């Protein structure tokens, strides 16, 4: 039997899916540009690590708009931190098992 | 309907928009088939401007190799993705938020945890056919 989308057990409020057919080109464009900034950081990591070693950077439209070793200070420099690509630049990659 | 993701190295990511109460922002989710639940990690929660007073302690614990943490819950969070045709893919849920407890972990550990990406777990991924082809670079969710 096919499992229903919302048929999940758990201890907190359950996720509910409401799939719309609403077109939202503005959101699609926002997310595309946000993703492109993350891709830009990845592709330019070698250059960035020389310029901003062990620092948090904020990137918008493939440009570093702020940097700081301290995360909280970086956020305070941004006008819209929630909608900005923020990444930590380090010579040592973070090895993670999630 | 296809949501296209991005392969950075061998890691699949999806951009999404998260709205919690009056807070709204974009989140770069790592698709993690090892995670049972979708998680908002510390640096994204802070960038969104979420304060501890807006979060409730969750009734469950999250367990990983490094130990167990009690997350917080952001009630009725809206997570939105978009398809390749620019169609909204909304998802409302009680979103788990992981914030390190400075009283329990060292400053070094807090710094490491802060670098972790938010995770798109199986509670979302299982609704789709998930493709992550490291040879071709293709990452997508389809239903």
Image (cartoon, coloured by chain):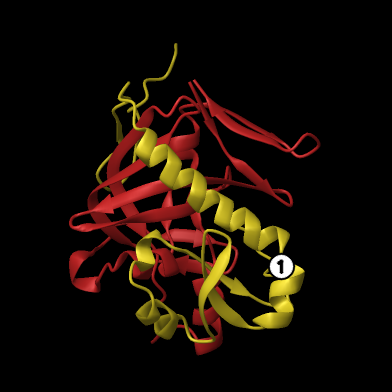
Chain colours: A yellow, B red
Q: Chain of mark 1?
A: A
Residue B126 in percent (x, y) is at 49, 31
The percent position of residue B67, horizontal first and vertical second, equals 53, 68
For this rendering, which residue is in front, B2 or B62? B2
What x and y, as percent, mark residue A82? 36, 63
Residue at 28 percent across and 43 percent down: it is B93
> Which residue is depicted at the point 34% across and 66% down?
A80
Which residue does the image show at 38% across and 33% down from the upper left?
A: A25
Q: Is residue B34 visible?
A: yes
- State the residue position of label 1: A45
Residue B9 horizontal/vertical position (percent): 74, 52
Q: Secondary structure at mark 1?
A: helix
Query: Which quadrant is the N terminus of chain A positioned in?
Result: top left
Camera-side residue of B36 and A58: A58
Q: Is residue B113 above or below residue B40?
A: below
Q: Is residue B78 left or right of residue B31?
A: left
Q: Quadrant of residue A97?
A: bottom right
Residue shown at 71% from the left, 70% from the top? A93
Determine the residue located farthest toward the right in the rendered image. B135
10 Å crowding of disc 1: few (<14), some (14-19), many (20+): some
Assign the C terminus of chain A to one quadrant of the image. Answer: bottom right
Q: Is residue A77 left or right of residue B57?
A: right
Q: Which residue lies most toward the top here? A: A1
The total of numbered circles placed on residues is: 1
Residue B101 visible somewhere in the drawing: no
Residue B52 sits above or below residue A22 on the image = below
């Amino acid at each position: 039997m096919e499992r229903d989308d919302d048929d999940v057990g758990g201890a907190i409020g359950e996720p509910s899916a409401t799939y719309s057919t609403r077109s939202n080109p503005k959101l699609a464009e926002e997310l595309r540009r946000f993703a492109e900034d993350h891709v830009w950081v990845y592709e330019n990591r070698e250059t960035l690590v020389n310029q901003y070693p062990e620092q948090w950077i904020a990137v918008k439209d493939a440009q570093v708009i702020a940097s700081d070793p301290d995360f909280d200070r970086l956020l305070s420099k941004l006008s819209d931190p929630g909608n900005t690509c923020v990444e930590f630049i380090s010579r040592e990659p973070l090895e993670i098992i999630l | 309907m296809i949501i296209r993701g991005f392969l950075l190295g061998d890691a699949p990511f999806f951009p999404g928009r998260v709205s919690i109460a009056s807070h709204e922002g974009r989140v770069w989710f790592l698709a993690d088939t090892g995670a049972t639940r979708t998680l908002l990690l510390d640096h994204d929660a802070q960038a969104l401007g979420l304060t501890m007073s807006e979060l409730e302690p969750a009734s469950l614990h999250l367990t990983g190799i490094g130990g167990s943490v009690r997350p917080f819950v952001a009630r009725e969070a809206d997570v939105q993705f978009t398809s390749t045709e620019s169609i909204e893919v909304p998802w409302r849920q009680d979103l788990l938020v992981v914030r390190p407890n400075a009283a329990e972990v060292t400053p070094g550990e807090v710094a490491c945890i802060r670098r972790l990406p938010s995770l798109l777990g199986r509670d979302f991924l299982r609704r789709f056919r998930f493709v992550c082809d490291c040879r071709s670079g293709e990452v997508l969710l389809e239903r």
